[in-house]
Image (cartoon, helix red, strand yellow):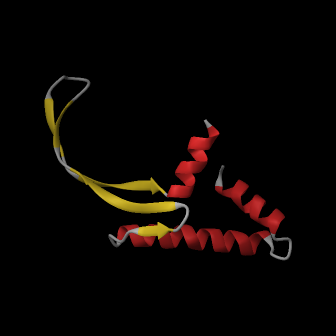
């Protein structure tokens, strides 16, 4: 599902709101999640899951063109952990 599809679904369920209003709300939610992660905070949405930043350690990699060993620096990556309800929903879908 894309962001525009999400906006369409919400608009169908809430005909009293305009698409511009819904787009503003959806963008605001996503921006707040990004800002919290950038600040190093964990974002938890009960019944859905949590977002946090994990640090990947530096490692020794290989340049695919030359085969030379290169140092890959450590970096922060986003991580999503699904909540219990999402896990159960996905298990039941199998």
Q: Quadrant of the C terminus?
A: top right
Q: Position of residue 4 (x, y in %)?
A: 70, 57
Can you tell which quarter of the image residue 30 is in? bottom right
Q: Nearer the viewer, residue 13 or 36?
A: 13
Can you tell which quarter of the image residue 24 is in? bottom right
Instruction: Name above or below for residue 79 compared with residue 92.
Output: below
Instruction: Name above or below for residue 70 compared with residue 35.
Output: above
Instruction: Name above or below for residue 31 compared with residue 94.
Output: below
57 relative to 89 in the view: left or right: left
22 relative to 27 in the view: left or right: right
Q: Position of residue 22 (x, y in %)?
A: 72, 71
Residue drawn at (17%, 46%) of the image: 58
Q: Position of residue 34 (x, y in %)?
A: 45, 67
Can you tell which quarter of the image residue 50 is in? bottom left
Q: Nearer the viewer, residue 18 or 64?
A: 18
Q: Nearer the viewer, residue 59 or 87?
A: 87
Instruction: Name above or below for residue 82 compared with residue 47.
Output: above
Residue drawn at (81%, 73%) of the image: 18
Q: Position of residue 7 (x, y in %)?
A: 72, 62
Residue drawn at (54%, 61%) of the image: 48
Q: Residue furthest right?
A: 15
Count of marks overlaid on the render: 0
19 relative to 64 in the view: left or right: right
9 relative to 84 in the view: left or right: right
């Amino acid at each position: 599902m894309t962001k525009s599809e999400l906006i369409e679904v919400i608009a169908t369920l809430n005909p009293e709101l305009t698409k511009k209003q819904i787009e503003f709300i959806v963008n605001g939610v996503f921006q707040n999640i990004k800002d919290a992660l950038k600040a190093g905070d964990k974002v938890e949405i009960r019944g859905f899951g949590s977002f946090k930043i994990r640090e990947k350690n530096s490692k020794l990699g290989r340049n695919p063109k030359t085969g030379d060993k290169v140092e890959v620096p450590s970096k922060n990556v986003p991580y999503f952990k699904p909540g219990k309800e999402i896990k159960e929903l996905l298990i039941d879908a199998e």
